[in-house]
Image (tube, grey):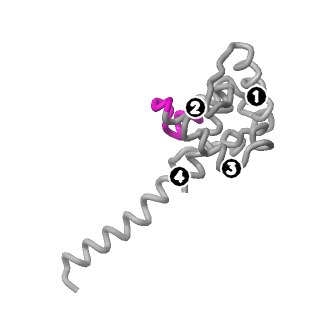
Amino acid sequence: MVRRNFIFLASGGVAALAIPSWYYMFGPHYDNLLATPELLSYIWDEQTMKDVGNQYLKNNTEENSEERLVQLLTENTSSNSFMLGEDLNQHICEDYKSDRIIMIDGWLLPVTEARQCALFSLNHSI
């Protein structure tokens, strides 16, 4: 084997192992409740949640990353994971009270649930 080919293949192998490891260690870590709109999951299938999430991301390009969505969804929430669902439901109620409602595909949604759908679509974009 030619030395140049060996170095090229070896560096490619190292990159193939290092990149997923780096993402696992330093990528976004969050509770799966953030990416699952609880009430909508009772009436919608996964594809509908993905479609709504993709549409939200198209309309809100500044929120088109997992990190940004997690940051927005966890603002003013408890660090206690047992309270996360309750905190999210509180945010949804506040969205309705404050008229933070958007229309996507004919559905009127609070911004919190739309963001959850967006995070869901990013997680299930395979």
Q: Look at mark 2 in the image and give the residue it sits on.
A: 71
Residue neighbourhood size for the residue with mark 4, other residues' Cα within 10 Å, grouped as few (<14), some (14–19), many (≥20): few
**Where does residue 18 sit, x and y in percent of width and height?**
42, 61
Looking at the rendering, the stretch of residues picked out in magenta corresponds to 59-70
Asked whether the beta carbons under mark 4 and mark 1 sit within 8 Å of each other, the answer is no
The numbered mark, 4 or 1, whose residue comes first in the sequence reads 4
Q: Nearer the viewer, residue 68 or 14?
A: 68
Asked whether the beta carbons under mark 4 and mark 2 sit within 8 Å of each other, the answer is no
Residue neighbourhood size for the residue with mark 1, other residues' Cα within 10 Å, grouped as few (<14), some (14–19), many (≥20): some
Q: Look at mark 1 in the image and give the residue it sits on.
A: 87
Q: Residue furthest top?
A: 98
**Which amino acid type is shown beneath numbered disc 1?**
Asp
The numbered mark, 4 or 2, whose residue comes first in the sequence reads 4
**Where does residue 3 sit, x and y in percent of width and height?**
20, 79
The numbered mark, 2 or 1, whose residue comes first in the sequence reads 2
Q: Does residue 60 belong to the magenta stretch?
A: yes
Q: Nearer the viewer, residue 103 or 90?
A: 103
Q: Look at mark 4 in the image and give the residue it sits on.
A: 25
**Which amino acid type is shown beneath numbered disc 2?**
Gln
CA separation, marks 2 and 1?
Answer: 14 Å
Image quarter (top left, top right, bottom left or bottom right) of the C terminus:
bottom right
**Which amino acid type is shown beneath numbered disc 3?**
Glu
Q: Look at mark 3 in the image and give the residue it sits on.
A: 46
CA separation, marks 2 and 3?
Answer: 23 Å
CA separation, marks 4 and 1?
Answer: 27 Å
